[in-house]
Image: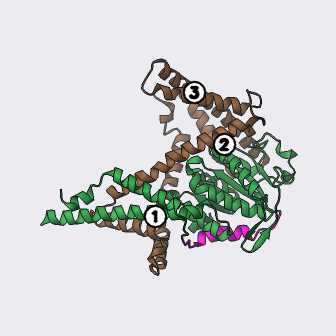
């Protein structure tokens, strides 16, 4: 029973959703709405689990004075502060309630945005270093890759004068022909793979998601 | 270790330092870089430009602050163009930090519209942008595939209220607006795989015209959809944003960043060439 009930549920709802997708009827729309609400409810449990996990891991780190435990304090303070400002527990600190709250917006604009932008901008340095070491003309294929990368990178460089137009055309051809062919093959392959996997799950052939017990 | 072997193994800290110097210098020294406009960007501009006042467009701001530098300029240029032409916009933000980005963009662009500006020879008067009349911001909901599919039936399904908690039915702009059928197009500006969901669950199912704004590294992945007609236009990275700013005659941070990107690319190319000269000469010497 422990395995049969989940398998039956997956089969039933899998087939139901396939039929629902292709039937433009009021009942079908109602089913979709109803099941969508269920997914959100399940998601809320996942959110609660995520918050609990974050608090527990951070608290244990502080309690046991693990390496870099001080950062865990910042994590917890950030979590509490954003929840309190967002839900207005401090009752309008610096006016405007909820998501328009002054502190909520300023925490996002002046802490979150610079932090994430800085982290991502570091990528440029790692890309520069990685491309210097990786782009070597070791073989014919590597040389072709190197050449293609260089053309795409310099395609809009205005300092190449009349060559720019040719570079642009070549880059456009590279993106629209070889790149397109490869990507399309991958997309179609992945799509077929997804359909096959979904069918295997719905029909109970693929049971890994049930776990080992 | 001879000079060619040294060329092959430059310490990465030198690469970092040189790149940082070039970025700072080009940021400080102000000069213009010529930007050539591609068809895929021009199609988006022309599409928006031919819409009438009062038309509705849908703008999905599906990016976090990490892709802000590349994607924010696209949002700013497109939304300002649409609002200057008195169009109405439905916003969503289906990435976790997207609501903050959308909220910031709406505030900044609303402020910009308080100034008289001239774009492409047309002078636009000042105007106040009002929530519920000129735009509606639906906010964030998890599971983008479900939200996109749900909005195809009715915006009220996934979003009974807007981001600020106001019921959709009480907003004047939403009278008679049900789903994508009333939108002239959907523009997804995204730094996430949410684009795939807009294509699979939105465009394919509901058939609306879809345009994309995406980060530079993602652009190559979406050419198949451009070629198949599922996507009618595409802006890739700072370059795409700069092209749009040029077309809209609204110079913003993307056109400004082009000179930094151009010289940063030239530094990367220079190091690649140095590394390859070292590699090829060393290999020849070893073979002899």
Can residue B96 be spotted in the picture? Answer: no
Q: Mark 3 — residue?
A: A76
Instruction: Name the secondary structure under disc 3.
Output: helix
Cα distance in 3D space between marks 2 and 3: 43 Å
- Mark 1 chain: B
Q: Which chain is brown?
A: A
Looking at the image, residue B95 lies above or below residue B122: above
Chain B display color: green
Closer to viewer: mark 1 or mark 2: 1
Check if mark 2's residue and mark 3's residue have beta carbons within 8 Å.
no
The image shows residue B18 at horizontal and vertical percentages of 39, 56
Q: Mark 2 — residue?
A: A16
The image shows residue B184 at horizontal and vertical percentages of 75, 63
Tell if the residue under mark 3 belongs to the same chain as the one under mark 1.
no
Q: Mark 1 — residue?
A: B263
Can residue B21 be spotted in the picture? Answer: yes
The image shows residue B118 at horizontal and vertical percentages of 75, 69
What number of labels is visible? 3
């Amino acid at each position: 029973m422990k395995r049969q009930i989940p398998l039956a549920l997956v089969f039933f709802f899998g087939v139901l959703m396939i039929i629902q997708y292709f039937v433009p009827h009021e009942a079908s729309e109602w089913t979709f709405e109803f099941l969508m609400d269920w997914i959100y409810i399940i998601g809320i449990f996942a959110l609660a689990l995520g918050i609990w996990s974050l608090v527990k891991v951070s608290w244990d780190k502080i309690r046991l004075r693990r390496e870099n435990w001080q950062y865990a304090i910042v994590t917890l303070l950030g979590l509490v502060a954003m929840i309190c400002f967002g839900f207005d527990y401090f009752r309008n600190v610096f006016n405007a309630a909820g998501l328009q709250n002054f502190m909520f917006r300023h925490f996002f604009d002046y802490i979150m945005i610079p932090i994430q932008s800085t982290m991502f901008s570091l990528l440029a340095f790692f890309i520069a270093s990685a491309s210097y070491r990786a782009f070597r003309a070791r073989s014919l294929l590597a040389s072709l890759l190197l050449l293609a990368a260089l053309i795409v990178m310099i395609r809009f460089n205005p300092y190449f004068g009349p060559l720019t137009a040719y570079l642009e055309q070549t880059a456009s051809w590279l993106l629209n022909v070889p790149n397109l062919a490869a990507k399309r093959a991958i997309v179609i392959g992945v799509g077929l793979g997804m359909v096959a996997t979904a069918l295997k799950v719905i029909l109970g052939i693929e049971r890994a998601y049930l776990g080992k017990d | 270790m001879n000079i060619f072997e040294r060329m092959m193994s430059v310490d990465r800290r030198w690469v970092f330092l040189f790149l940082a110097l070039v970025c700072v210098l080009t940021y400080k020294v102000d000069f213009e870089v010529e930007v050539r406009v591609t068809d895929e960007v021009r199609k988006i501009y022309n599409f928006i430009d031919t819409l009438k006042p009062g038309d509705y467009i849908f703008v999905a701001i599906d990016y976090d602050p990490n892709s802000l530098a590349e994607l924010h300029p696209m949002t700013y240029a497109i939304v300002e163009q649409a609002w200057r032409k008195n169009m109405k916009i439905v916003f969503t933000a289906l990435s976790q930090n997207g609501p903050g980005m959308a909220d910031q963009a709406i505030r900044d662009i609303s402020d910009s519209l308080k100034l008289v500006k001239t774009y492409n020879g047309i002078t636009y008067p000042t105007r106040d942008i009002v929530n519920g009349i000129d735009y509606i911001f639906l906010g964030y909901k998890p599971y983008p595939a479900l939200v996109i599919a749900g909005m195809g039936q009715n915006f009220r399904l996934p979003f009974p209220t807007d981001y600020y908690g106001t019921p959709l039915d009480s907003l004047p702009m939403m009278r008679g607006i049900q789903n994508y059928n009333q939108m002239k197009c959907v523009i997804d500006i995204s730094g996430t795989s949410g684009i795939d969901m807009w294509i699979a669950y939105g465009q394919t199912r509901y058939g609306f015209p879809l345009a994309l704004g995406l980060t530079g590294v993602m652009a190559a992945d979406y050419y198949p959809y451009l070629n198949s007609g599922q996507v009618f236009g595409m802006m890739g990275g700072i370059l795409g944003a700069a092209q749009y700013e040029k077309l809209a005659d609204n110079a913003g941070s993307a056109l400004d960043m082009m000179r930094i990107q151009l010289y940063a690319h030239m530094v990367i190319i220079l190091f690649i060439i140095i590394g390859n000269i070292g590699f090829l000469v060393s290999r020849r010497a070893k073979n002899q």
